[in-house]
Image (cartoon, rainbow, N blue to C red):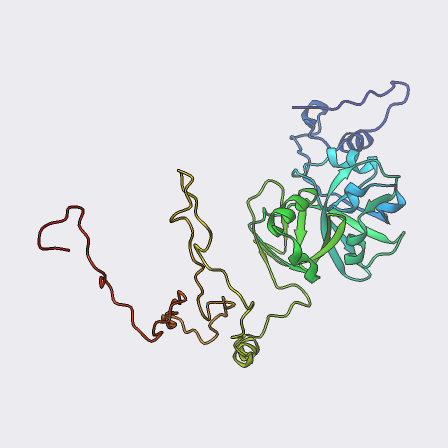
């Protein structure tokens, strides 16, 4: 057992009651049997409770890491008092504005502030309705580990982020806890985003240090869902564009061929003219119904080779004359 002893000058003898108070002032477990005062006494667990003047981080200096996080800067005397108390780590605190009956929760980053002062992010001061120099009560608390949190972006600009969950996860690394109805801020790509904490589980205030937390987003403030009925009416009233895009269209295999032996015989091809063969711009079927298939049938264009044949003549397959490599008798 760790015991703190106080050496007293023999020329200045103090009474038993004074010695008892001096030992208890050390706030540690002391075996009082050695002093003859009866059974052993243990230090009763206490909580940290103090009142400080509150100032924004900008009054302390250029500390962007503190301004965009959820931790505060406290004086060294707070660290000395916290180390003497049997508190649970990590150190989490509840900030209370008694005048406005507002409270929030935070962690601590450093103990380098001036005595009697604390420096907190400006967004936290807005949540607590505090002005520079106002009094705020600080109590150490123990919060449950977060399992779920729901946020609501305060601007539709948040929808421009490609992966909002990954960005939020990286931003929350500077936070120690979350409180329902708080408005948190973080910076991404030189832009400031605000998110309101709508819900936290398993409690109103939770710790997010080393936890697996599910995240959900509510629709952004100012976001409006497109009206599906209005969009469908707009598509039905839009006329079908059946006009040709160009007067002349692409004709496949209309180029001139080349022979390996260099001869021109049989390499020249007559250009194929396809009437009304100009391409048409693809138009979506706005009357399409789910579960159906629509077949669009178009007449096959007739091929014109410049001869004075009847264009109405129908093409007949395998109607040509046969030829043989070896001429036989009786066959011309």
Q: Nearer the viewer, residue 47 or 261?
A: 261
The image position of residue 245, as x and y in percent, is 56, 68
Q: Which of 303 and 185 is in front in this view?
A: 303
Task: For the C terminus, give its image quadrant.
Answer: bottom left
- Tally of numbered discs: 0
Q: Which residue ends up furthest to the left in the rendered image?
A: 329
The residue sitting at 45% across, 65% down in the picture is 273
Q: Would residue 151 be found to the left or right of residue 251 on screen?
A: right
* Quarter residue 44 falls in: top right
Q: Which residue ends up furthest to the top in the rendered image?
A: 10
Q: Would residue 229 be found to the left or right of residue 252 on screen?
A: right
The image position of residue 261, as x and y in percent, is 39, 38
Q: Nearer the viewer, residue 326 or 68?
A: 326
Q: Would residue 239 be found to the left or right of residue 63 on screen?
A: left
Q: Which of 246 and 287 is in front in this view?
A: 246
Q: Where is 170 relative to 193, above or below?
A: above
The image position of residue 214, as x and y in percent, is 55, 51
The residue sitting at 74% across, 24% down in the picture is 4
The residue sitting at 71% across, 31% down in the picture is 28
The residue sitting at 89% across, 39% down in the picture is 114
The image position of residue 158, as x and y in percent, is 67, 57
Q: Where is 157 relative to 244, above or below?
A: above
């Amino acid at each position: 057992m760790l015991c703190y002893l106080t050496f007293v000058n023999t020329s200045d003898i103090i009474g038993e009651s004074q010695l008892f108070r001096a030992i208890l002032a050390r706030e540690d477990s002391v075996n009082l049997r050695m002093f003859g005062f009866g059974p052993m006494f243990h230090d009763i667990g206490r909580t940290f409770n103090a009142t400080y003047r509150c100032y924004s981080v900008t009054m302390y200096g250029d500390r962007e890491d503190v301004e965009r996080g959820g931790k505060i800067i406290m004086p060294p005397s707070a660290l000395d008092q916290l180390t003497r108390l049997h508190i649970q780590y990590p150190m989490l605190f509840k900030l209370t504005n008694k005048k406005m009956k507002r409270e929030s929760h935070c962690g601590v980053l450093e103990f380098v502030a001036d005595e009697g002062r604390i420096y907190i992010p400006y967004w936290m001061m807005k949540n607590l309705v505090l002005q520079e120099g106002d009094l705020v009560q600080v109590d150490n608390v123990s919060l449950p580990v977060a399992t779920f949190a729901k946020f609501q972006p305060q601007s539709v600009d948040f929808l421009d982020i490609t992966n909002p969950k990954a960005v939020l996860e990286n931003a929350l690394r500077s936070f120690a806890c979350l409180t329902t109805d708080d408005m948190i801020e973080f910076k991404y790509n030189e832009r400031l985003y605000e998110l309101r904490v709508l819900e936290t589980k398993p409690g109103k205030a939770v710790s997010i240090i080393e936890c697996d937390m599910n995240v959900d987003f509510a629709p952004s403030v100012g976001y409006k869902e497109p009206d599906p009925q209005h969009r469908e009416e707009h598509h039905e009233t839009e006329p079908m564009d059946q006009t040709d895009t160009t007067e002349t269209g692409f004709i496949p295999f209309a180029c001139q061929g080349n022979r390996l032996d260099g001869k021109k015989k049989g390499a020249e091809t007559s250009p194929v003219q396809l009437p009304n063969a100009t391409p048409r711009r693809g138009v979506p079927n706005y009357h399409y119904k789910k579960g159906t298939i629509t077949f669009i049938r178009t007449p096959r264009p007739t091929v014109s080779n410049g001869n004075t044949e009847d264009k109405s003549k129908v093409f007949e397959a395998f109607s040509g004359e046969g030829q043989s490599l070896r001429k036989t008798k009786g066959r011309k």
